[in-house]
Image (tube, rainbow, N blue to C red):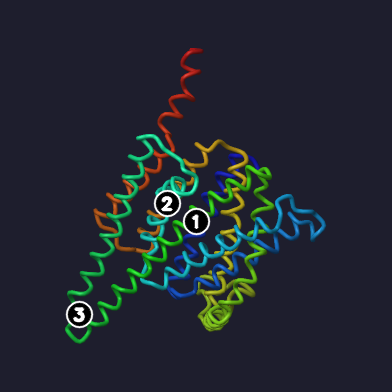
Amino acid sequence: MGAAAAIVFVFIGCCSNVVFLELLVKSEPASGHIITCSQFLFIAIEGFIRTHDFGRKKNVIPIKDYLVLVIMFFIVNVTNNVAFAFKISMPLHMIFRSGALIANMIMGIIVLGRRYTLMKYLSVIMITAGTLCCTFASAEDIDEGKEVVDSAEEASSVSTFVIWLSGLGLLTFALFMSARMGLYQEVLYEQHGKHPKEALYYIHILSLPGFILTYESIWEHAMKFSYTEPLEALADVPFLNSAPRMWLFLIGNTLTQYVCISSVFTLCSECTSLTVTLVLTLRKFLSLVFSIIYFQNPFTYLHWVGTMLVFGGTLLFSEVIGKIRDALAPKAKEE
């Protein structure tokens, strides 16, 4: 699969994955464990067959190094999915995770002693301001809901706000853990070389035992999924006309997650960081807009201001304008 195909499949896989994820969490906000487990299990099985060649291919990076990466990766993914159970909306979830650059910069300064240019710091300020705008706007939505409740429901409303703050805490934790994981992975690749497919396989298969800790939640939601109504749109399709809709959504989410993550890995090996950054940033933005329009999630002018700051800051951080200018300069001289 070349660069063009990888870009197409990034948009198809990642954007459609957001749709299936929202369909799942709208019906079952606490279904994060079964969603994550399904994704990990599928990628592990696929990797065992294609990457590990049924156990015959020896790994390049030592297992002990992968284990540290696995623990962090598992915690990040589970935490991000569990956050939906804490009154976190899909738009806020996507925007908040776009602040990964901030966490990465902070962890880079603390862990590796890195220093950055003024432009980098400016972009981080933009992203931080954008994230705060969206967070504040979402808090206003909750406050508006408080005004319509009577005194008998006041305690419940306060409890909802506390739950929402807890969700923000989980997202913040996942953000910094993800940044630390990225730095660890960077050091690992410097030592042993880049082996993205191997890393993808081992990260997922070594994480599977961790789901034993959440088996009760997985089993509970598996039962709930089994008793959901079939999709009316598939009434005339054999075998699928009686399938519970939540299982179909879960299968769709798992398959599109595989397409998404494998395409991103391919894109990283085929294109420059500039192309990857542009594609992923645009993909996030389109997913956000689709989520707002199709699922009618609340989105105020403050949300839009925050969104523009986040994505604008992301592009500024990646020095897109300067790289485009440098890329066009040789052509201008030739002409």
Q: Nearer the viewer, mark 3 or mark 2?
A: 2
Question: Residue 169, percent across and down?
Answer: 38, 65
Q: Which residue is mark 2?
A: 103
Question: Alpha carbon of mark 3 to alpha carbon of mark 2: how far?
Answer: 37 Å
Question: Alpha carbon of mark 3 to alpha carbon of mark 1: how far?
Answer: 38 Å
**Is residue 45 toward the left or the right of residue 312 in the image?**
right
Residue visible at 70% across and 64% down in the picture:
45
* Residue 238 showing in the rendered view: yes
Q: Nearer the viewer, mark 3 or mark 1?
A: 1
Question: Residue 332, percent across and down?
Answer: 46, 16
Residue at the extreme bottom: 152
Q: Which residue is mark 3?
A: 149
Question: Residue 138, percent across and down?
Answer: 28, 63
Name above or below for residue 317 compared with residue 75. Answer: above
* Sequence-first tag of 1 and 2: 2
Which amino acid type is marked by label 2?
A: Ala
Residue visible at 40% across and 43% down in the picture:
314
- Which labelled disc corresponds to residue 178? 1
Which element type, helix, strand or loop, lies under badge 3? loop
Residue visible at 65% across and 48% down in the picture:
196
Neighbor class of circle 3 (other Cα within 10 Å; few <14, some 14-19, many 20+) is few
Which amino acid type is marked by label 3?
A: Val
**Is residue 202 toward the left or the right of residue 163 in the image?**
right
* Sequence-first tag of 3 and 1: 3
**Is residue 176 toward the left or the right of residue 211 in the image?**
left
Question: Alpha carbon of mark 1 to alpha carbon of mark 2: how far?
Answer: 8 Å
Which element type, helix, strand or loop, lies under badge 2? helix
Asked if marks 1 and 2 touch (Cβ < 8 Å), the reply is yes
* Sequence-first tag of 3 and 2: 2
Which amino acid type is marked by label 1?
A: Ser
**Is residue 249 toward the left or the right of residue 289 in the image?**
right
